Amino acid sequence: MKNLLTIVFCLSIAFFASAQNQLKVNPNFSFDLASPGVKNDFDAIKLRHQLSQSLNRGGNEVEILIDYADSNGDDIFLIQNINMNYTLPPDTEITYVVVGFDTLHDVVTDIGYAYSDFDSVRVDTLYFLFGHENNSNTTDSIVIKVIQLNANGYPTTTELWSDFFTSSSSFTGLPNWTNIILAEVPVGLVLPPNTRFGLKIEYYGAKEDTFGIVYSFVDKGPCPTFNTNVSAELSDFWPNSYRFDLFNSMLLPTATGQDIFLDCDNNGTPETPWFMQNINFYTQVTGFLAGGGPGPQGCDTLSNVLPTHQIGLYPTQNGYVSGNNEYGD
């Protein structure tokens, strides 16, 4: 069940990114706040990554840990419910989300790489923050897809790798979908030459069940027009986070960069970007320089390598979960 928190938009006007393609603000949109300290467990992974980098300096391999939210300095973290079973009408929510890893920006060293800097790139591990509650006692599924980006870095429908997880109870073991945990999924996929990738997550569940992903932004202050005490700055990595907006029946931002912008200063010009600037999906990749190459198992030194259809789950600061939980068919 979706439990809305108290910060609610008062929306009565449709705003748009351009005159050619009017985009409406969902009048039912509301904030759902993620738990404080939501990224504590990923911080520990960053320390492991930093140690691994120091041990492997000077070789033909470059380990890169990508976390656009942290690299951007985000300070507001929210949670958004998604479900592939939402339909319009009556639903006005988001069906699926994608993060395009168009820029190989290492969060620890603050160094950015291009795919062309390497002979090959291996996707070692995927991470994502999520919450879930199962009230129906029926089987819910999370489908994780590595997809190809086009030449402009926009998501395509080409799937390079996929896996899925199922459960008839809460994936997290926590009482509410706003209680967040970190998932770690080993991949070991060597990308085809000149191929950039993204992470797409689809959730299939009964509508009385709720699955949520975390997104974030840098707060630029109140937005009086919408009666909120926060608003978003445009991410340094925009556009990287995409959502299929059922209310507008399209993937936003669009391939031409159109998105919902808000007129927070009431000057008649919508210039404040939408809140979903950085979806909190992360990845570790390894870039191989000339003379290097992916190892025979295609696995990095940091991941807890799990069999197919298993997912490593880490506790939040609430301490409800410890160790790894396994879900599968």
Image (spheres, rainbow, N blue to C red):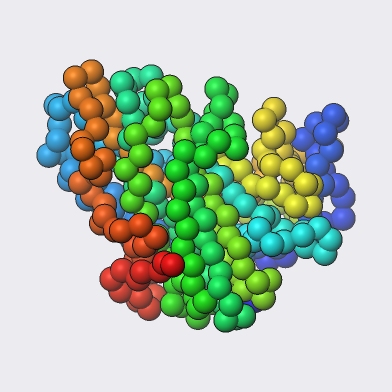
Query: Which quadrant of the figure contains the N terminus?
Result: bottom right
Q: Is residue 147 left or right of residue 115?
A: right
How many marks overall?
0
Q: What residue is at 60 percent from the left and 37 percent from the top?
A: 157
Is 293 on the left-hand or right-hand side of 7? Answer: left
User: What x and y, as percent, mark residue 316?
Assistant: 38, 69
> Compared to 265, does 227 lie above or below?
below
Kindly tell me whether residue 73 is visible in this rendering.
no
Residue 7 seen in this snapshot: yes
Residue sitting at x 58%, y 77%:
138
In the image, residue 199 sits, relative to residue 114, either above or below, namely: below
Please report the residue visible at 23 percent of the width from the left and 49 percent of the height from the top.
302
Instruction: Determine which quarter of the picture holds residue 230.
Output: bottom right
Q: Residue at x 65, y 72 (%)?
A: 206
Residue closest to the eye, 86 or 32: 86
- Residue 112 image offset from top left, x and y in percent: 37, 28
Residue at the extreme front of the image, as rendered:
329
Q: Position of residue 64 (x, y in %)?
A: 31, 37
Horizontal relation, residue 48 to residue 265: left or right = left
Closest to the observer, 146 or 64 = 146
Q: Position of residue 2 (x, y in %)?
A: 65, 73
Up the image or down, 38 lies above or below 215; here it is: below
In what quadrant of the picture does the C terminus appear?
bottom left
Location of residue 19 (image quadrant): top right
